[in-house]
């Protein structure tokens, strides 16, 4: 390769790496495996070494991948958060050990500490006088995001206060925030019930939720953090091992699997042990970190631009095996999205038998150019569902049939429609597609929706098969004999189902709205929407702009709400549900008039508040005798301004000289 070609290749590699870095660090939606990414980086590194004139200080080989995100305050690290060099081969570890032996005086003994490489998000925790006061992400290594509040809310095991005799005024502790497999599965189940796509792996889930802007109940303590380094101002303790022990005595979570190793053989034994034993761990790891134990030796060895010379990460290759593609089938979800699923000749991979793999969408099938009977490579990285990474073309049979994405719904035969921006195909038959109906009804009776526990998946299948129901509204017209005559139903079960249905009529409006399964309207969104639109009529009549006033509602969500209410079938369904007696208005606790402190005063509320929802605030004002108005007029006494208030209202109020109150001030006024 000449310099010109190398230049082109380097430019292309840097662009690819930048793209994947963005997906990984900023969007938490990686497209390629860590392994594939590291291969790109290694290629770039080799080229830059071969053509030193083409290397540059801001190349990906010299910098850490992430950039601080825009939604959080960006803060400088007291000490840069550098990354680790990595290797995928035992030989790489051997070279690392040999290099260290060469760099340190021949007479010194060297000890290493081997630790698990947790697969999550690196965090820096700052403590002052024993109190946790800041949690910062790695970001670009120099500055990261201040995520203190999120970390305190979401991470179960980090101490907020520490005590100890020898505690310095300030300490910095670094560790990895991770999500256990069990919490990951729980979170994905919850996402599925609200129609959200599942997250690919625990690392993505951790990155994603640490970036959410509201502390949601569902995220309370779903993460753990394990510490792997302690930075002390001034005098250091003599070894990494002692640092870990010190951290443990101060009450920090230290994963007990680290081990001191005196030589390469011990290091390799540790690596091999965890290669299989990691299948039994409750949390995700992607390798092992090997560190020189002695701090004085670490200092002697020093750092490169990007990583310490005294440590290395050995990463496990994603397990990859070949098997045969038997056929592809298509699943239709509650919202009509059609997902292709590959059925494989079963193989044992990473401790589990794999029979199926996800194919995501139509373009994935095209990208892989899949043919039936192909020998395909299956990879199981951090992901729960394995995926097909490639096809062994040399094994392809001459007359094999290419896999062609279906054009019609496998359940109802409707012609599928494509949503361009998402590259997804939908079955448009929302009203009658049995798969969508099954999904819709399962969602409707779900514990978090109408909570009709006596009706499960099988009962719904039966009801659909006997054409007893064709929409959620039909549940409310079921008669005793309809159910009793189904296979396997006796008096007791029949009674329970009818009672469950009857009781569901009392479920509050928020649950009813969630149960409808409007696309993009999950549990959290329902709370926000009902805050602004306390009944179904106001919601059905809302405009796109009106909907987008609700915090967190963007154009996509607003549009799917509009679409829902425009659909004649949905309007019919709502009318039938209303006639059945379901709740279509939000009920707030009745004002109790605890005092008349605000009597005769009129308030207009604009924006959102951290302490209360809008309806709640209105109720509190009314409770104290105040009146609520909906527009600025001379009658208005106070404009209460929250986050993102309507600019027109603020201007009008100012023009009329009307007093404004911020959240703190109205809080004061509401005090007894
Ligand atoms: S030590 C200078 N130890 O791996 C030493 N890192 O690619 C820096 N990680 O940013 C890190 N487990 O997020 C260390 N036991 C462990 C680790 C660990 C996971 C992560 C960490 C770091 C990345 C390096």
Image: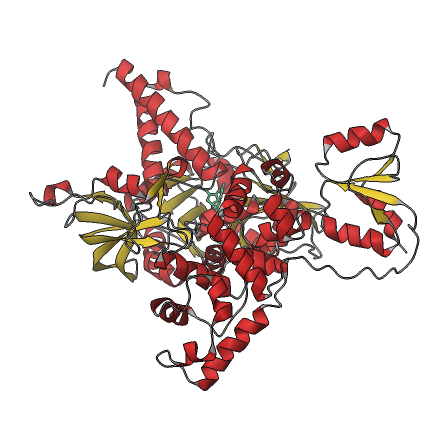
Residue 570, x across and y down, in percent: 49, 52
The correct choice, above or below, for 209 with respect to 577 in the image is above
In the rendered image, the residue lying farthest to the bottom is: 491
Residue 84, x across and y down, in percent: 44, 39
Q: Quadrant of the C terminus?
A: bottom right
Residue 671, x across and y down, in percent: 88, 53
In the rendered image, the residue lying farthest to the top is: 4
Asked if residue 293 can be seen in this view, the reply is no
The quadrant where residue 601 appears? top right
Please give the count of numbered marks on the rendered protein: 0
Tell me the residue at 45%/62% (across/down). 441
Residue 643, x across and y down, in percent: 72, 39
In this orientation, which residue lies closer to the viewer: 95 or 315? Answer: 315
Q: Quadrant of the N terminus?
A: top left
The correct choice, above or below, for 520 with respect to 252 in the image is above
Asked if residue 473 can be seen in this view, the reply is yes
Q: Is residue 112 left or right of residue 398?
A: right
Q: How is the image coloured?
A: secondary structure
Q: Is residue 94 left or right of residue 542?
A: left
In this orientation, which residue lies closer to the viewer: 424 or 426? Answer: 426
The correct choice, above or below, for 623 with respect to 105 in the image is below
The quadrant where residue 456 appears? bottom left
In this orientation, which residue lies closer to the viewer: 377 or 126? Answer: 377
In the rendered image, the residue lying farthest to the left is: 398
Q: Is residue 225 left or right of residue 461?
A: right
């Amino acid at each position: 390769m000449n310099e010109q070609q190398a230049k082109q290749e380097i430019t292309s590699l840097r662009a690819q790496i930048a793209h994947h870095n963005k997906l990984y660090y900023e969007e938490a939606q990686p497209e390629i495996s860590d392994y594939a990414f590291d291969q790109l980086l290694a290629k770039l590194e080799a080229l830059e070494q071969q053509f030193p004139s083409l290397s540059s200080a801001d190349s990906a080989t010299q910098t850490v991948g992430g950039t601080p995100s825009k939604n959080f305050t960006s803060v400088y690290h007291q000490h840069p958060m550098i990354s680790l060099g990595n290797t995928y081969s035992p030989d790489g570890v051997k070279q690392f050990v040999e290099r260290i032996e060469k760099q340190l005086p021949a007479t010194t003994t060297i000890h290493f500490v081997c630790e698990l490489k947790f697969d999550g998000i690196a965090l820096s925790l700052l403590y002052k006088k024993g109190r946790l006061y800041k949690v910062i992400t790695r970001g670009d290594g120099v500055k990261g995001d201040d995520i203190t509040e999120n970390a305190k809310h979401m991470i179960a095991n980090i101490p907020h206060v520490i005590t100890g005799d020898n505690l310095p005024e300030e300490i910095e502790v670094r560790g990895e925030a991770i999500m256990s497999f069990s919490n990951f599965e729980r979170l994905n189940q919850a996402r599925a019930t609200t129609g959200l796509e599942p997250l690919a792996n625990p690392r993505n889930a951790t990155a994603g939720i640490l970036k959410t802007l509201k502390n949601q109940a569902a995220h309370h303590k779903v993460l753990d953090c394990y510490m792997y380094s302690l930075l002390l101002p001034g005098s250091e303790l003599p070894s990494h091992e002692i640092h870990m022990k010190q951290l443990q005595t101060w009450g920090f979570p230290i994963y007990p699997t680290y081990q001191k190793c005196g030589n390469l053989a011990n290091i390799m034994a540790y690596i091999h042990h965890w290669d299989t034993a990691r299948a039994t761990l409750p949390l995700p790891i992607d390798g092992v970190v090997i560190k020189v134990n002695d701090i004085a030796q670490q200092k002697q060895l020093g750092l490169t631009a990007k990583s310490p010379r005294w440590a290395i990460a050995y990463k496990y290759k994603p397990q990859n095996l070949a098997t045969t593609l038997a056929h592809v089938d298509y699943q239709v979800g509650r919202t009509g999205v059609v997902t292709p699923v590959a059925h494989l000749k079963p193989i044992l991979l990473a401790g589990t038998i794999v029979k199926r793999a996800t194919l995501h969408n139509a373009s994935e099938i095209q990208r892989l150019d899949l043919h039936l009977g192909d020998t395909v490579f299956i990879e199981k990285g951090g992901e729960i569902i394995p995926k097909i990474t490639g096809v062994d073309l040399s094994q392809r049979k001459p007359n094999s049939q290419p896999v062609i994405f279906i054009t019609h719904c496998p359940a109802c035969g409707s012609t599928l429609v494509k949503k361009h921006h998402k590259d997804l195909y939908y079955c448009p038959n929302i009203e009658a597609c049995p798969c969508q109906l099954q999904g819709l009804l399962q969602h409707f009776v779900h514990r978090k929706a109408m909570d009709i526990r006596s009706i499960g998946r099988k009962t719904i299948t039966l009801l659909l098969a006997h054409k007893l129901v064709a929409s959620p509204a039909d549940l409310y017209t079921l008669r005793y004999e309809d159910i009793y005559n189904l296979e396997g139903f006796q008096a007791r079960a029949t009674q329970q189902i009818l009672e469950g249905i009857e009781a569901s009529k009392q479920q509050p409006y928020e649950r009813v709205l969630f149960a409808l399964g409007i696309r993009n309207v999950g549990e959290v969104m329902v709370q926000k929407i009902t805050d602004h639109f306390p009944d179904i009529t106001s919601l059905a009549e809302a405009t796109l702009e009106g909907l987008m006033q609700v915090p967190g509602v963007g154009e996509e969500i607003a549009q799917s709400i509009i679409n829902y209410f425009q659909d004649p079938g949905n309007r019919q369904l709502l009318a039938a549900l209303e006639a059945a007696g379901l709740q279509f208005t939000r009920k707030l606790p009745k004002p109790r008039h605890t005092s008349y402190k605000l009597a005769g005063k009129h308030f207009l509320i604009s924006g959102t508040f951290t302490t209360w929802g809008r309806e709640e605030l209105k109720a509190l004002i009314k409770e104290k005798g105040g009146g609520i108005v909906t527009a600025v007029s001379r009658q208005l006494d106070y404009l209460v301004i929250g986050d993102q208030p309507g600019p027109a209202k603020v201007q009008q109020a100012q023009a009329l000289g009307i007093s404004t109150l911020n959240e703190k001030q109205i809080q004061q006024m509401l005090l007894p």
